[in-house]
Image (cartoon, helix red, strand yellow):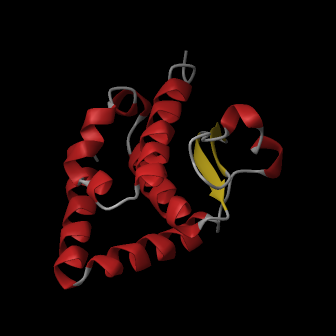
């Protein structure tokens, strides 16, 4: 699996849902958010240093048990967290370490999210990229 394949998969989903109705994208994000919390970040890891601070609601992310996990009560935020976790976790560590914020502009998620959600989305990417620097060294 490579990042281009995963990004294209999510971009195609978003484009298809947008063609039906933009509200469908939010419904899809909420359903992904519910799935995120099936295997959430442990309670012990939901601490300030793992918090996405620009998110309106609590959203936490960390590298735990050999992969990224996240947790949020806010279902839209949990939905985009699910997408990010899925993309990062589908790659091997060396491939994941090559990810940049610009890679995610291809799926055009930022065109769908409100300003505060968009800021949280990109902050979460930065946090995940930063955490990968300490993995496998």
Quadrant assignment for the C terminus = top right
Question: From where the camera sits, is residue 51 visible?
Answer: yes
Q: How many marks?
A: 0
Residue at x-position 46% and y-position 53% = 117
Nearer to us in this view, 10 or 30: 30
Residue 19 x %, y %: 16, 79
Residue 123 x %, y %: 48, 37
Nearer to us in this view, 112 or 14: 112
Residue at x-position 60% and y-position 53% = 56
Furthest-top residue in this view: 137
Residue 14 x %, y %: 25, 68
Examine the rendered structure and indicate whether residue 13 appears above or below residue 20: above
Residue at x-position 50% and y-position 54% = 81
Question: From where the camera sits, is residue 2 visible?
Answer: no
Examine the rendered structure and indicate whether residue 122 appears above or below residue 69: above
108 lies left or right of 77: left
Furthest-front residue in this view: 115
Furthest-right residue in this view: 44
Examine the rendered structure and indicate whether residue 52 appears above or below residue 108: above
Residue 57 x %, y %: 65, 56
105 lies left or right of 113: left
**Residue 74 lies in quadrant:** bottom right
61 lies left or right of 92: right
């Amino acid at each position: 699996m490579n990042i281009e394949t995963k990004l294209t998969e999510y971009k195609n989903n978003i484009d298809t849902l947008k063609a039906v109705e933009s509200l469908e994208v939010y419904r899809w994000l909420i359903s992904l958010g519910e799935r995120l919390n099936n295997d959430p970040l442990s309670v012990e890891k939901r601490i300030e240093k793992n918090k996405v601070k620009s998110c309106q609601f609590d959203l936490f992310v960390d590298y735990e048990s050999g992969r990224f996990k996240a947790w949020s009560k806010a279902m839209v935020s949990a939905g985009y967290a699910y997408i990010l976790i899925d993309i990062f976790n589908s790659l091997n560590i060396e491939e994941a370490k090559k990810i940049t914020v610009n890679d995610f502009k291809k799926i055009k998620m930022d065109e769908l999210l409100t300003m505060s959600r968009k800021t949280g989305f990109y902050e979460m990417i930065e946090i995940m990229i930063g955490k990968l620097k300490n993995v496998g060294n």
